[in-house]
Amino acid sequence: MNVSAVPELAPPLRLLLGPGPSMVHPRVLRAMSTPLLGHLDPRFLEIMNEVQAQLRAVFRTENPFTIAVSGTGSAGMEAALVNLIEPGDAAIVVAAGVFGNRMAEIVGRCGGRLVKLDVPWGQVCELGRIEEALRKEGKVKVVAVVHAETSTGAQQPMEGLGKLCHAHGALLVVDTVTSLGGVPVEVDAWEADAVYSGTQKCLSCPPGLAPLTLSPRALDAVKARKTKVQSWYLDAGMVADYWAEGKRVYHHTAPISMVYALRESLRLVLEEGLEARFARHRRHSAALMAGVAALGCSPQAQEGHRLPSLNCVRAPAGVDEGAVRKALLNEHDIEIGGGLGPLAGQVWRIGLMGESSRQENVLAVLAALEQALAKQGKAPKPGASLAAALESYARS
Amino acid sequence: MNVSAVPELAPPLRLLLGPGPSMVHPRVLRAMSTPLLGHLDPRFLEIMNEVQAQLRAVFRTENPFTIAVSGTGSAGMEAALVNLIEPGDAAIVVAAGVFGNRMAEIVGRCGGRLVKLDVPWGQVCELGRIEEALRKEGKVKVVAVVHAETSTGAQQPMEGLGKLCHAHGALLVVDTVTSLGGVPVEVDAWEADAVYSGTQKCLSCPPGLAPLTLSPRALDAVKARKTKVQSWYLDAGMVADYWAEGKRVYHHTAPISMVYALRESLRLVLEEGLEARFARHRRHSAALMAGVAALGCSPQAQEGHRLPSLNCVRAPAGVDEGAVRKALLNEHDIEIGGGLGPLAGQVWRIGLMGESSRQENVLAVLAALEQALAKQGKAPKPGASLAAALESYARS
């Protein structure tokens, strides 16, 4: 490649309805392009305070340790686990999809003793099963669950889980990458100890930061470690000293522009209001699901436990789902996701997250799906899916 | 804090002449605010190819594994070390400042056997000393040096070091955070095996990515590991499968907007040309150093080994250096850096990196320093430092 000939950046304009990133509001793009402050500038430190307060509101927590990790969602996952798990510590991980399995993988890399509760993809884990594992294992350091499994569209119920973990002396780690800002996340009410997310899903901010909150109980566990955290970059004690008001010890350079973007995206979330935002996510998801049902798609996730932010549906029998996604991208500039792991080639993952969760997007993707299916000779009654979506809107 | 009252983002406009971030060109800010593609969009994968080619040109390497790690410079450091060092591996680390010491700290967290060569801050390490350590230690996995020590302004000579390491069966890891794009970095000519940098220094891109290149020899070492890399997020094998053309296996979501920004900043670097850019950095550094000498400042770094990108000078005797920095920030909106560790309270670190390396900035900071010193009764002859800078420019 002749590197001097790399042209001006001119990507196509896509409608992002996949598993993330979601659409970003122009206000967020504009804030992100603000000329930079230094990462130790007193004004930047105020901005960090503001972002911490905003994140506490969105996480619904009073945890002083509530920050944005300098990496994408997976860095948040790694930060939560490497800080809490020391070699030999037992960790129960609910694995009901890609992200539960990723947690299990990281537990292994921490030298933890992994107790993996495998759950069929699309299902959720019953509290009783976790309780049984806690009883059986004796001393358990961490129970880790994915609240919103991006690979299956299932939403793990959280009621009673924190209390159960604490009754057994375990800490509760929760992945809210695809729920925070779109589906109720109640860190304090759940009594969760380490909760992380990503910015590019229901917060509608570009990827690059991972919101993370640790309870005082989790911080005590970090302080009581016998060994150093294996990651210097993600060491919660050191990162806390940078984020803590009054300390601000230099650790590493914060991704300043991303912090600007996150701040603006959180302003938008809080201006809309969390409850209104959750209702919006439910309304558009219901319309989409009504529409895709009319196209012959059935939901992958267990009934009663479906994420409104990430709609995972099985492609109609006999349809080449990859060709449909390609047609959506190339002919309509619409991105939706395919299946991962055992679901590859079988499902579509349609994200209606944050700014992407809008009526015009629901109609656009349904129309495009109908046209792509028609090309494969699988067209349903023309307009039936849009009609079903509109009926859903009329009821809501 | 009332989070609903977080106001519009309106930071003061600073002239960034500290140890980073440096000034960002408007073209980079504009590219960064481009609406996003998905991280698996075919067009985004082309953009990744372009950035890889640009990075190879700037690193002066043919290494296929040349990527941008999804984190700031310290994540690049951690990525280089955690992938190469397994528990029990010996690592020789030259520690001549904060960043050499950070490498040593990370080696410890990898379970490596650390052989630390302490060097007085501001000095560089002689090749003979590293050779002696290699002879003495026998089997050494890694020799790690900081090319441009941001905490002291010293530039480590690299000639012969790669050959020496390889003759002893060791891999060479080099930190070029404060040199890449401002000072010659010659990955292939140095025979360096793992070289990382940050974006917010001489590349003049916002912080958030860490360029990293691994030689085929380093990749062989990664493949020959007996244990898994302790970081899942920074696992080079898995990250490589995402960046490799034709593979593109999903690992984690790339920070898309930051990749846009880096691509544009590298376009600017390559449009200017590396040699012209290095000459520019030398020219403005020489003028600045002439100017601060006239203010009574002496360089911290060893003569003949001073970084043009990061000018570390001792504050004149009896001056409250912190008050001077505060005056620069509050009265002139100019950020410069203070000293870290043993140099705290003693030095200023004036960065002239990338877009910050300009004549008007040299004059601005000299004038502001003169005025701040005058307030402390330490004013030199009015205008003498600017005159010295102009004389330097006249000679160059």
Image: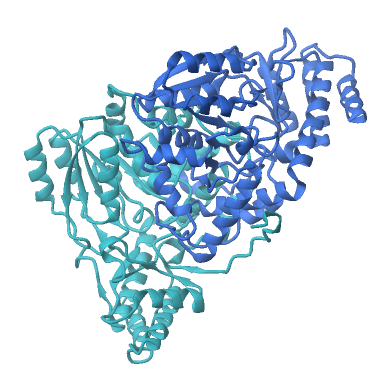
Chain colours: A blue, B cyan
Q: Nearer the viewer, residue A212 or A337?
A: A212
* Residue B149 lies in quadrant: bottom left
Q: Residue at x 26, y 30 (%)?
A: B86
Where's residue A244, x and y in %?
A: 48, 54
Of residues A222 and B59, the one drawn nearer to the viewer in this rendering? A222
Q: Which quadrant is home to the C terminus of chain B?
A: bottom left
Residue B387's image quarter?
bottom left
Position in image of residue A62 (x %, y %): 59, 46
Identity of the residue furthest to the front in this view:
A167
Residue drawn at 49 percent across, 56 percent down: B268
**Numbered circles on residues, count:** 0
Is B215 situated left or right of A78 in this image?
left
Residue B250 can be seen in this image: no
B346 in relation to A387, above or below: below
Which residue of the protein is positioned furthest toward the bottom in this rendering? Answer: B381
In the rendered view, tell whether residue B379 sits above or below residue B52: below
Percent across and percent down for residue B202 are: 41, 58
Residue nearer the viewer, B59 or A195 = A195
Location of residue B199 with respect to B372 vertically, above or below: above
**Where does the image place residue A16, in percent across and percent down from the top left?**
69, 35
Position of the N terminus of chain B by quadrant: bottom right
> Can you see residue A339?
yes
Q: Residue at x 34, y 64 (%)?
A: B310
Please tell me in which quadrant of the rendered image residue A301 appears.
top right
Query: From what the image shows, is residue B363 above or below residue A349?
Result: below
**Residue located at (67% from left, 42% from top):** A204
